[in-house]
Amino acid sequence: MEQRVSLITLGVADVNRARRFYEELGWRGQQMQETVFFQAGGLALVLWSRAKLAEDSGIPDAGTPGAFGGIVLAHNVRSTAEVDALVGAAERAGANVTRAPATTFYGGYAGAFTDPDGHTWEIAHNPGFALAEDGSLVLPDFGAAGPE
């Protein structure tokens, strides 16, 4: 298996409401058969009915919107000012800010919010993780620092 993520699909309660939320953040999507696709760098973020996603995955949907689903999506940016701006934009679009932007334990700066369906997003500036010109994340060589 190649080391790659191609799509991240979020199960949502209302596809149109979720699309409006992400478009309020400046994303532009394409809708096809009750599913919205957003190009996100080298992968796609997909919005689809939570019930249909659970059924398609063969997993009972015991969760409820707003409960932690065990997944956090991260969006890294180039500055602390961008963190503040994006978390503020998300809140104005209807997000629930779950962690106000602040300095992190790793020397970065980050905040977190949940979208209207309870999916958790972290907006982070991590000076140790470079961003390429196209916005893709470039992981450092963790072995270069030596063993801990």
Image: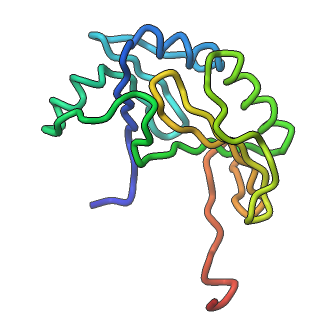
Colour theme: rainbow
Name the residue located 62 percent from the left edge and 77 percent from the top edge: 142
Look at the picture and state if 148 lies above or below 17. below
* 49 left or right of 55 in image: right
When asked about the image quadrant of residue 101, the answer is: top right
Name the quarter where the C terminus is drawn. Answer: bottom right
When asked about the image quadrant of residue 49, the answer is: top left
Name the residue located 15 percent from the left edge and 29 percent from the top edge: 55
Front residue of this view, candidates 61 and 108:
61
Instruction: Name the residue at the right extreme.
Output: 81
Instruction: Name the residue at the bottom extreme.
Output: 147
Front residue of this view, candidates 19 and 95:
95
When asked about the image quadrant of residue 33, the answer is: top left
Look at the picture and state if 32 lies above or below 61. above
Front residue of this view, candidates 2 and 115:
115
For the question of whether residue 46 can be seen, the reply is yes
Name the residue located 47 percent from the left edge and 10 percent from the top edge: 17
How many numbered marks have been drawn onto this rendered protein structure?
0
The percent coordinates of residue 20 (x first, y second) are 53, 10
* 138 left or right of 106 in image: left
The percent coordinates of residue 43 (x first, y second) are 45, 38
Name the residue located 47 percent from the left edge and 30 percent from the top edge: 118
* 65 left or right of 89 in image: left
Look at the picture and state if 129 lies above or below 47. below
Look at the picture and state if 133 lies above or below 18. below
The percent coordinates of residue 77 (x first, y second) are 73, 43
Name the quarter where the N terminus is drawn. Answer: bottom left
For the question of whether residue 134 can be seen, the reply is no
